[in-house]
Amino acid sequence: MIVAERKPIDEIIGFVQDCKKILLVGCNECVTVCYAGGKKEVGILSSALKMAFSKEGKNLDVKEATLERQCDPEYVQQLSEYYDQYDAIVSMACGVGVQELAMRYLNKQVFPALNTNFMGASQGQGIWEERCQGCGECVLGRTGGICPIARCAKSLLNGPCGGSMNGKCEISKEVDCAWQLIIDRLTGLKQMHMLEEIFPVKDWSPAGHGGPRRMVREDLKS
Amino acid sequence: MRLTYPDSIRIIRLPCTGKIDVIHMMEAFRKGADGVYVAGCLEGECHYLAGNLRAKKRVEYTRKLLDEIGIGGGRLEMYGIAASDGPRFAEVAEEMHEKIKALGPSPIKGAIQKGVLL
Amino acid sequence: MVKDKTGAIMVVGGGIGGIQAALDLADSGFYVYLVEKSSSIGGKMSQLDKTFPTNDCSMCIMSPKLVECGKHLNIEILTLSEIESVTGEEGNFHVRLIQHPRYIDIDKCIACGTCAEKCPKKVADEYNTKLIKRKAAYIRYPQAVPLKYLIDKKNCIYFRKDKKCRACEKFCPAEAVDFDQKEREITIDVGAIILASGFQPYNPAISDSYQYGRSPNVVTSLEFERILSASGPYQGHLVRPSDEREPKKIAWLQCVGSRNTRIGDKGYCSAVCCTYAIKQAIVAKEHSAIPLDTAIFYIDIRTHGKDFEKFFNRAREEIGVRFEKSRINSILPAHDEENLEITYLNGEGKVVREEFDMVVLSVGIDIPKESIDLAQKMGVELNHYNFVSTGYFDPLRTTRPGIFVCGAFQGPRDIPETVTQASGSAAAASSLLSEQRHTLTKEKEYPEEMDITGKAPRIGIFVCHCGTNIGGVVDVPKVTEYASKLPNVVVAEENLFTCSQDTQVKIKESIHERQLNRVVVASCSVRTHEPLFQDTIREAGLNPYLLSMANIRDQDSWVHRSNKDSATEKAKDLVRMAVAGASKLSPLYRTKLPVTKRGLIVGGGIAGMTAALNIAGQGFEVILVEIEKELGGFAGNIRTTLQGDNVRQYLAGLIEVVKHNEKIEVLTETSVAGFSGTKGNFKTVLGVGASMHHREVTHGALIIATGATEYRPKEYLYGEHESVRTQVELEGMLLTEGEKIKGWKDVVMIQCVGSRNNSNPNCSRICCQQAVKNAIAVKEINPDVNVFILHRDIRTYGFAEDFYRQARQMGIHFLRYKEHEDPIVEKAEGKIHVTFKDLTLGREITIESDQVVLGTGVVAGDTEDLANVLKVPLTSERFFLEAHVKLRPVDTQSDGIFVCGMAHGPKTIDESISQALAASARACRLLSQDYIEVGGIVARVDPELCASCLICVRACPYEVPFINNDGVSEIDISKCQGCGICASECPAKAIDLSHFEDMQILTQIDALLEAS
């Protein structure tokens, strides 16, 4: 899932300080699950913004709406009936959602309320870790299912660097060395021979280094 | 044990402090409470095992949020009080009342002066 | 023709044991008379500050049971009552009681406390162990049930001085005082009786050696409980009585009135004092503002209960409680006459004089004279210590058929053991009267509920004066006038006493005449009065959840007496909030689910078989599952009990009876493979027989009785030398190899093998008794043999102390070795050398022994698989964890699943039997219902909003929510406990707790903070 967190309130207030009425839009997918932009967080941010305004003697009218997904035009369309009554739209979705709103509602300013962090997995209540960088050419089949691109600080493809100490990465004792994990796992699976083949220099063009990516499935297209 | 405590306090009943939500505390402040405190069981004595521990974390989170918007997290507190400990209840009420009195009225404009105990 | 038995049971004694027995019986279809000598139930537990080993607040955990007992439709509490005689027989007893007058009409008293306030006579308060005064008109304690005042005739001025005074009568707002009340004789017919009259603390004034009664700073442990208590004489501030200053040093003296045949013939160990002294020392240190020195003077530390050893370790290692192994020489007033000087022999054998600010006497459990008289009136035999005499294998049955016993009157024991026995005695009595179930119980009928869907709120509000309790401070007419103008309010009335019978009639009339669909009562606490008003509106056809209360007494008039205006303003605020909340209330319904009237028991040892027989005896089918080929369990290895009862014979008989009971289906070589469902309706998949073929069984309750195993030693040459055996192995030899034993000259027994160490921190409870038993048996076979028992503490708690004394008299040597300096066992020619450092002599000793016997501990069996399947938690030592260590000792956290025997922790056979009966009582409480009601205040998921994020699944402390086949969270209302944690964690706001919905809470906040 996409993991995000709320921006500092001050920054959000900065976006909307001249507004009287705003539309605050949550998303019921990834950002709900990571406690950043679901219906609950929409309620809390709404209350916080209104309170911050009233502290300054100003009034802010907030319309709360939480869409099933902000990254699909049909759901985004659901705001069309009333969005125009508001001075601005604040999105509590990931960066994708913010842009979908911006592209659909051209005459409204759309502001992000979240910082979108990474694609990751939940490691128990309240803990998320990065697992994938969307490089467009998956190597997991050769690295025991553990990604050296997302989880090695240097994204090394042919074994650890000299900084791996007691299974931990040199950037922090909190971070596991991805290559230690890969080697432990392959040893356990008796598949260490897979590492004997050297990875060639990686082609980073599918990773977005060749410009914004787009995917078309002819079989699904209408 | 009919001890007295400050008359600024109003109590809202919940089945367990585990039911307290960030939005309840936020809205109490937005509607003009000068202070809010959550009174739960002593740690380790929650009738529902972990409710007060969850509540404590939510109170911490809300305090930070209140700091962020300039209301002041110090206006929100959580206390653990044993059900039989009337004197402690009164003591906490007094403590909270004095604390809020020292902080002065809520910066929310037009707020009425009151404390709320959830 | 044989007369039908009576479906009512009398419980004598309203302490925690009596309360538990009464609740279990009343919930299982019997009408209960709970007879209590004093003015309220609660017993000794109500006087305790904290309870070990969790240091839970005693009153906090007990008061829900008090309230439940007080309002139970099928429990009739008879306070101030004493038994005069019991005639008739098992099944049909006639009990004659005397009820002493209270001088206050229980139906009129509103517990406002005016009588006590106005009473001019001050007398010593027994509840607070006479450390402070109360009035002659009083209640024992604020949470007392029934919450009704009484007049103490002995001290009342009216009775003592020619009918003068009458202050209470004059000021009572409810006209409840009645000086004309007379002693009343009552005759009651019951089918069985449970004796639960408890104990009294030993009175140390009998002995002149403790300075008790001479120095105010020498107190008993019960007095110290009151000193520590927040509701006690010093409001929980730890001060000593002489000058009310904080003590810097406190000493506890153990075994005061116990383990001593000289003083008042109390040779037994009181079993609870070591652990409560540790508790008190810990709590005292917590209370003390200055660093407090606490020293416990003891003979043996007996922390043999479940997890008690860890509590002891925490006290000495982390908290710094001092333990001095010494029976002190003397205690004398110090020079300043307030401190006390204790002289004792320290660990190195030196005489030490030490001054303490305060001394606590850890007094033992004693049987009061009234109980001895009671037993005589009832025709029940007592043992040599005046405790009720029972058989080892039938520990809850007295010598008179139909009369059962539980708690401290049967033997010294702590709260969980008392609660266990209480449930157990309820099971035994129920089994006797099972055919009479539901013949005398009452059930309330209610009219059909009005449908209020789509109707606008029409609220009636009833504001209470509570005599002058509210009306004397709050301007009730003004509040009522204010309330009448609030939105949706159609009726606003004020009443002198809203809780009185005539007001209930008025409320019902209003509901009918004005078509009310919500009711607000502005009076007192929901804790005490919500059930009453809910019942009233139900009687008028309203759903009980359509009631809202504003507490303008406890939260207003009582606590803001000095400012009437502001109290009136606050009352308006509270009323406005309650009215706003009421308009958002919706009816809640409870669903009835039929109960599968069958029990499943896992484990066919003594505990499992005992439970099976009792459930069958109570009229229900049972499936008894045993993993081995034969029934019997670990007891098959035991020859006799310490008391000399023949275990083998008993076990063989028990197996036969179980096998031939037509209600019991025995499945051997069977294990549990799968488990689902909720209380009342479980489905279990069993792997049956050698082929392990799967069979699905349905049942309403499940009892875990899987037992435990013996620790297999890796130390002391066990398995390497033929003359090193375990106590269980020695026991096997006693029967068959007597000749060999006759050849022994020296036998060394080593205790705490595999217990009380790092890998198993707990005490195994039974090994000391086992060693004493086998040592005596060896000595009887071979009187010339030297038996040495190397130990750390000898823990022969309760009456087992007699056998420890006997063993010493027989010349068996008890020698202490030091913790962390285990004895060394070495091979030597033909012999085994055991070397250890003797703590009394302070030097190393080597014993050349023919035989070394290891007192091996009890370890849990393979509990993990079963725990996983049943989703029941284990302790860190892998025993099954009870729902509450004090008050729910055989329940697990999963409703409908119970635990007994060694699966719960190490215990003796008689203790396992009591616990098995208790588990049966709890299971039958469920099985005796035709249906269970679920729902009410529970969490509900809106599947449309659910993001399937798993947060509720992870957050629920009871593991109730799960993601269902539709991919959304589902909460089984029959399992939900209603705490609301999931609702407040849900990031999609898909979960709400009914009756405490977000919208309802926010409405209340809005209304409360709305500028009036």
Image: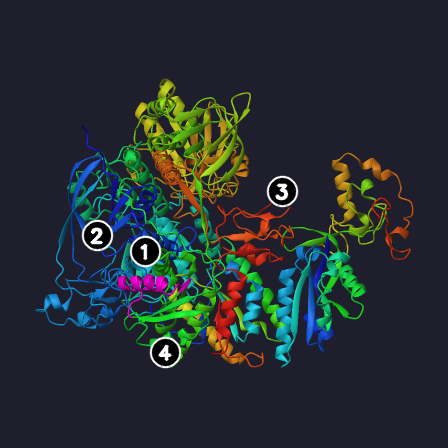
Depth check: give the residue in front, C147 or C812: C147
Tell which tag, 1 or 3, sits nearer the viewer.
3
Does label 2 or label 4 sit earlier along the sequence? 2
Q: Separation of disc 2 and disc 4 at Cα?
A: 45 Å
Pointer 1 chain? C
- Name the element at disc 2: loop
The reply to whether callout 1 and callout 2 are in contact (CB within 8 Å) is no
- Label 2 or label 3, whichever lies nearer to me, is 3
Q: Earlier in the sequence, mark 1 or mark 2?
A: 2
From mark 4 to mark 1, how far is it between C-alphas? 40 Å
Mark 1 residue type: Ser
Mark 3 or mark 4: name the one nearer the start of the chain.
4
Estimate the x, y position of residue C763 in percent, counting from the top left: 43, 41
Three-letter amino acid code at the position of disc 4: Lys
| Residue that label 4 marks | C478
Mark 3 → mark 4, Cα distance in angstroms: 57 Å
Judge depth for marks 4 and 1 and give the one in front. 4
What amino acid is at disc 2?
A: Lys
Crowding near the residue tagged with mark 1, few <14, some 14–19, many ≥20 C-alpha atoms within 10 Å: many
Categorize mark 3 by other alpha carbons within 10 Å: few (<14), some (14-19), many (20+): few
Which residue lies under the disc numbered 3?
C965
Task: Write down the residue under mark 2.
Answer: C37
Q: Secondary structure at mark 1?
A: helix
Task: Tell me where the magenta segment starts and ends, as one range.
Answer: C496-519
Q: Establish if C564 lies above or below C303.
A: below
Q: Is residue C510 left or right of residue C710?
A: left
Disc 4: CA contacts within 10 A as few (<14), some (14-19) or many (>=20):
some
> Are there few (<14), some (14-19), or many (20+) residues within 10 Å of tag 2?
many
* Marks 2/3 same chain: yes
The reply to whether callout 2 and callout 4 are in contact (CB within 8 Å) is no
User: Which numbered marker is on residue C46?
Assistant: 1
